[in-house]
């Protein structure tokens, strides 16, 4: 008798240790730990600290995920793990944990591309992706517009990426400039609630008619904020943190939404999926919803708990690969910290 697939997903690409369990498109349970507080004093993620935190968290978080899902370790039929991209030491820890489970249970192992996991996260909330869609990935390390068909069967087409800072990275840097702490996304968002998004007219880069349609750049925006803060401080005036935060957030959101909606219309599609840690931003969600409604575009964004890095999204890719009868990667799969996204499953090393 064929067992119903129960896929364990393992995520450790940055500072979240995630284990998730998915079966036939349904999230059964998950566990998640973050080492963000340990990195806060440094203003960003320290790879060695992240790796040690993954080591400490792996077994407890696996146990939490199993308990949350109401399954035993022996019920796992397949394992999927992020094998890239990400911090090298961090990816190695999660992949080693996944290999250990797969070896101990003698079950297939899939090496998964981290960004494909973000796209798959939406399927856990809204069901299968349409035949064709545009996916905007916005996170601490990535800002990309993708054209996606079948997530695990078809090649993934990069329409555009950021030339410099990712959107989430820009949030982190501006948060430091404003003395708000780390990680930048949540603290900027909270500060912006009491601010005026029109108080400062910060630049919207790569938006002129001759610029690449789907390419992003946030470095100049960060510099504009820094110069504004410097000018105000030199004048001896108090820095209007809330107004600057709101104006910066609006500038980022305007560019993200405009380019993503343009990609949907240019390709004759009707669905936009926004994923990644920055997709949890309330302003982005509100502006995207308003613009998509006006353009007749279906907008899909996972709930905030599935936007940040997590094991559930990796399990979701593994579940799709199992149902597509994909060949497992096997225990020979290696970590690829700089993996380029061409498909959901990363190839074995040559």
Image (spheres, rainbow, N blue to C red):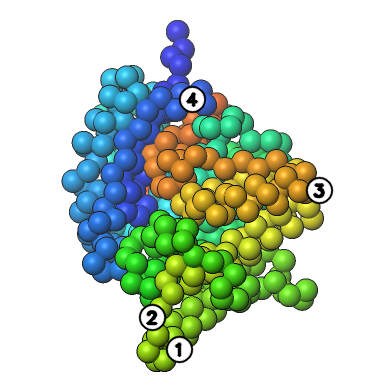
- Foreground mark, 1 or 2, reads 2
Q: Earlier in the sequence, mark 2 or mark 4?
A: 4
Q: Secondary structure at mark 2?
A: loop
Left/right placement of residue 49 relative to residue 308 reads: left
Circles 2 and 4 in contact, beta carbons < 8 Å: no
- Foreground mark, 3 or 2, reads 2
Q: Which residue is mark 4?
A: 26
- Foreground mark, 3 or 1, reads 1
Query: Label 3 crowding class (10 Å Cα cut-off): few <14, some 14-19, many 20+?
Result: few
Cα separation, mark 3 vs mark 1, equals 45 Å
Q: Earlier in the sequence, mark 3 or mark 2?
A: 2
Q: Which residue is mark 3?
A: 268
Circles 3 and 1 in contact, beta carbons < 8 Å: no
Cα separation, mark 3 vs mark 4, equals 30 Å
Circles 3 and 4 in contact, beta carbons < 8 Å: no
Q: Earlier in the sequence, mark 3 or mark 1?
A: 1
Query: Label 4 crowding class (10 Å Cα cut-off): few <14, some 14-19, many 20+?
Result: some
Q: Which residue is mark 2?
A: 238
Q: Secondary structure at mark 1?
A: helix
């Amino acid at each position: 008798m064929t067992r119903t697939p129960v896929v364990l997903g393992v995520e450790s690409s940055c500072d979240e240790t995630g284990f998730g369990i998915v079966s036939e498109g349904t999230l059964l349970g998950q566990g998640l730990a973050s080492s963000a507080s340990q990195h806060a004093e440094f203003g960003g993620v320290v790879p060695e600290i992240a790796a040690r935190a993954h080591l400490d968290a792996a077994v407890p978080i696996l146990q939490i995920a199993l308990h949350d899902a109401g399954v035993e370790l022996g019920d796992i039929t397949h394992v999927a793990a992020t094998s890239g991209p990400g911090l090298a030491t961090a990816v190695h820890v999660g992949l080693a944990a996944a290999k250990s489970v797969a070896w101990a249970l003698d079950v297939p192992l899939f090496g998964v591309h981290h960004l494909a996991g973000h796209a798959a996260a939406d399927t856990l909330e809204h069901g299968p992706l349409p035949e064709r869609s545009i996916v905007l990935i916005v996170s601490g390390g990535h800002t990309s517009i993708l054209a996606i068909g079948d997530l695990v069967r078809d090649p993934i087409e990069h329409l555009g990426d950021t030339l410099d800072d990712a959107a989430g990275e820009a949030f982190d840097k501006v948060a430091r400039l404003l003395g708000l702490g780390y990680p930048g996304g949540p603290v900027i968002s909270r500060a912006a609630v009491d601010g005026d998004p029109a108080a400062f007219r910060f630049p919207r880069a790569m938006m002129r008619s001759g610029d690449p349609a789907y390419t992003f750049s946030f470095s100049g925006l960060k510099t504009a904020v820094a110069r504004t803060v410097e000018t105000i401080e030199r004048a001896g005036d108090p820095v209007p943190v809330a107004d600057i935060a709101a104006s910066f957030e609006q500038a980022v959101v305007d560019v993200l939404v405009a380019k993503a909606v343009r990609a949907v219309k240019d390709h004759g599609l009707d669905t936009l999926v926004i994923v990644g840690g920055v997709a949890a931003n309330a302003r982005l969600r509100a502006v995207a919803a308003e613009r998509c409604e006006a353009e007749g575009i279906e907008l899909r964004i996972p709930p905030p708990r599935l936007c940040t890095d997590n094991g559930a999204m990796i399990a979701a890719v593994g579940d799709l690969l199992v149902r597509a009868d994909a060949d497992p990667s096997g225990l020979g799969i290696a970590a690829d910290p700089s993996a380029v996204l061409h498909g959901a499953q990363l190839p074995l090393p040559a």
